[in-house]
Image (cartoon, helix red, strand yellow):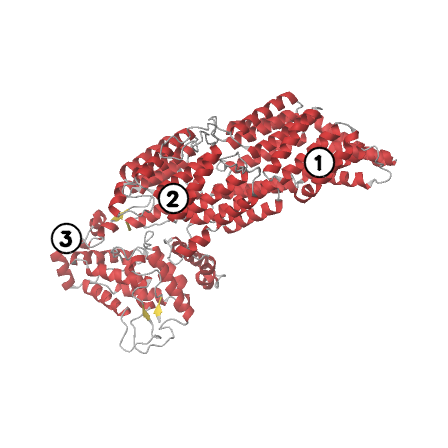
Amino acid sequence: MNLFAGVGGGAADGGGTGTALLELTPHKMAVCHLVQVFAPAAQAGGDVVPPFPFESLTHHNRLGLFLFTLTRSCDDFLEPPLEEFLKQLRAVDDLTNGWFCEQLTSALSALNSPDDLFNFFDKLRGVFTAPEGASAEDVFLDPNSQLGVFLRCCILAFNSMTFEGVCHLLADLVMYCNSADASYDLAEHEDFNSEMGNLMDADIGSHAGIFDKFHQGYASEHHMGESSSTLTRASMSPYDFDNDDNPTCLRSRWQLEAYLNQQADILEKDPGSVPLNLFNATMTQLQTLAPELHRVQFLQYLNALYHDDYVASLDNLHRYFDYSAGMQGLFGRSLSQVQDIVVGKYESALLCLGNLHCYFGHPKKALEAFAEAVRVSQMNNDDSCLAYVLGAISNLLSKIGISNTVGIISSPYSLGTNIGLGTPLSIQQQLLVLLKRSLKRADALKLPSLLSFDHLSLAKFDLKHVQRPLVSFGPNASTKLRTCPADVCKNLRLGSRVLTDFGADVLSTSNDNGSFSTSWLRNLSATSDSWRSSSKNTKKIHINDFDNFHYHAQPSPVPASILQLAGSAYLLRATAWEHYGSAPMVRMNVLVYATCFADAASSSELSLAYVKLIQQLAVFKGYSAAFCALKLAEKKFPSSTSLHIQLLGMQILHERALHRGHLKVAQQICDEFGVLSSSVSGVDIELKTEFSVRRARTLLAAKQFSQAAAVANSLFSTCYKYNMQVENASVLLLLAEIHKKSDNAVLGLPYALASQSFCKSFNLDLLEASATLTLAELWLDLGSSHAKKALSLVYQSLPMILGHGGLELRARAHVVLAKCHLSDLKFSVLEDPEAVLDPLNQATEDLQALEYHEMAAEAYYLKAMAYNHLGKLDEREEAAARFKDHVTALETPHNEEDSLKY
């Protein structure tokens, strides 16, 4: 049978080993020797039982897995010194009492001359040779397997060396072995010394001298493919995620690119963990040592971008595209290789420039860059870049508010501003057209990431916008002005199917870039070290790699970007269910995301998932439980690096301050919201909306009704200007609440009815139930003659409120229900006391967890009235005393500073 037959494909997919000649190093020679032990020279009639010294197939496979991992990892990161390599090998060599390590060191020590090296590599050829009469059951190494390709490249590299190069390799082998055993040295044979003396320098015996020559850069004869594997020497800076202590190893160009790709992933996932200046120092060093590696500049651009350094990010972006983008295109195109060098530079640069302006809150400049990118992409027939630009424009229009309806995209090659009828398209209509156009292009070009992004963007659009037809008149004009949850669910499902679609096309091709192999070896070394440090855990080594890590950390063939998009679909599902009012579905989708996609998620998205879960705790369990969870979240995501966590803490503190009646604290927190939002028009619209809402609620709690109404009216105008219809529903409900508390129920009714209408149009079921409850309160304020109507409205909203509402909304519904009964002249408390007391008892219990003094005082006041009707004087006095306590706490607050702590 063939060992690892077909693993990793042929020579073209050998982890980089097949596409370019390997630089032969002592570490690779050590691996070659172990491969020879793993798959010895084939012999006819070989038995299925593993050869000596393996005790079982499991033991044999464990070494094979170790070697396979080495061939993947050593070409992705710096090669380890012999001492570290032996530590890793001992973790696998437990069943043979260190036989592998002893045999390896003795074999390397026996290589004392160029002839020994020649014999060593000549023996490696026998690993591939299938003897005459070999059957399918005989064990030999498949030349096209991962290990086979690795051995073939090493043999080819040795055969291509000059004699001087062989001598250098032998000298490096001395240094490699001396790193673990200082007693090792070259044998002093006279013949060998005379050969070395004739060809090399008199100081060749000096280790430092030899290495200095090699450090300056030794290159053998030029071989085919050498230009694609330029060898670069790079010493490791203090900022090195590989934690390698061997600063003199060589890195190939693609190894450095793999390193940079890993750092780019870390920057995207958790930029707060990357020091700005130290990272730039490392990148500058790499750029000096490898000036042709232009992605260093792009990584410096990302580093400056994520650290909010506008000048540095813009400068690095310009330098990257000035020097490299024409040679290193960002997208795969169907054009020839020569044409690919010509096109793709300018439009890709404009796309990145637009994203930079969008990140820093410059929407007009971003749109200008995107519009120019659309023009250049169409002029160069760059369909892939055009599709991404259209997706970026739609993302900009959906995230950043832009009030102008004409001339947003001024390019004559864009979609235009009208439909041929002289009617300008609104921002939302332009956004919808862009999304559908981008979706169509992504589907035609087979771009799974962009396709998933467009589906999620369409789901978000359908969630917040009513799709009005472009032609809205005539007999066939649609009169349905409601969002369609079915369309939202359909696009969410199609967006998460990117995993299935990606798997159908790409899963047959290996996507391991070496990161899994590196993690496997780190786990192996860590387990080995912990085993040696504690003699009590002698069995731990037996389950370190093959039993635990192998089964629970398999390399995912799906890229992290695809997993992020699939996870984003679950986050968007949670947001959709928040709009529709289903709390259990919100929790379920967020938990699925946090459980299944946390490893691939960025810190921003993962912190958002934590925020949603903590918000659910605050609404359904009270502030104590929410603050306990918030403390854990702050340990994982410091508030200084996570805006989501910081805003959540401020939101909960503001809610608690309002409920306690600590208005100074509430105003202080409200001012902090205003400081966090940008002063640029159209930027941070959601944060500015949050600030205005909380400011109005703070003024309402202070009984400054006219000022609160002015703030709410201004906010409504802003939301209407930027077509934020979902937010308008909440603002209208806030206006109704302001008029209700100012004893002006007649003015509050139109706002409550309008909010209810908005909620029906956008399927905001829970918010609609809250609006219906407010409408019932307004009818009650008009007099006892409207108690029956108010009661019917309460009963209409109760199923949704009791099924999905939080503590405050449920308590409020119970209080209003009791007020309806007590206000009804035909209702007798003596005949049905439970109809009043049961909801009031439930309300006081819920309000206790919220510390909501004002509503709790109202509930106890109603209880005292009910007990008075029943003639229960003791219960009445107890309820009256509790009423007085809450009123006193509300009117004369103490220890307001405690409201800023949790």
Say few, some or many: other residues with alpha carbon within 10 Å of mark 3 (under 14 / 14 to 19 / 20 or more): few
Which residue is nearer to you in this view: 348 or 162? Answer: 348
The label nearer to you, 2 versus 1, is 1
Label 2, label 3: how far apart the Cα atoms are? 44 Å
Give the amino acid type for the residue marked by disc 1 in the picture.
Answer: Arg
Q: Quadrant of the N terminus?
A: bottom left
Residue positioned 58% across, 43% down in the render: 577
The label nearer to you, 2 versus 3, is 2
Q: Which residue is mark 2?
A: 264
Residue positioned 42% across, 45% down in the render: 440
Q: Could you tell whether 395 is left or right of 157 in the image?
A: right
Say few, some or many: other residues with alpha carbon within 10 Å of mark 1 (under 14 / 14 to 19 / 20 or more): many
Q: Position of residue 874 (x, y in %)?
A: 85, 36
Q: Position of residue 864 (x, y in %)?
A: 81, 33
Q: Which residue is mark 3?
A: 201
- Locate residue 872: give its quadrant: top right
The earlier-in-sequence mark between 2 and 1 is 2
Residue 55 shows in the view = yes
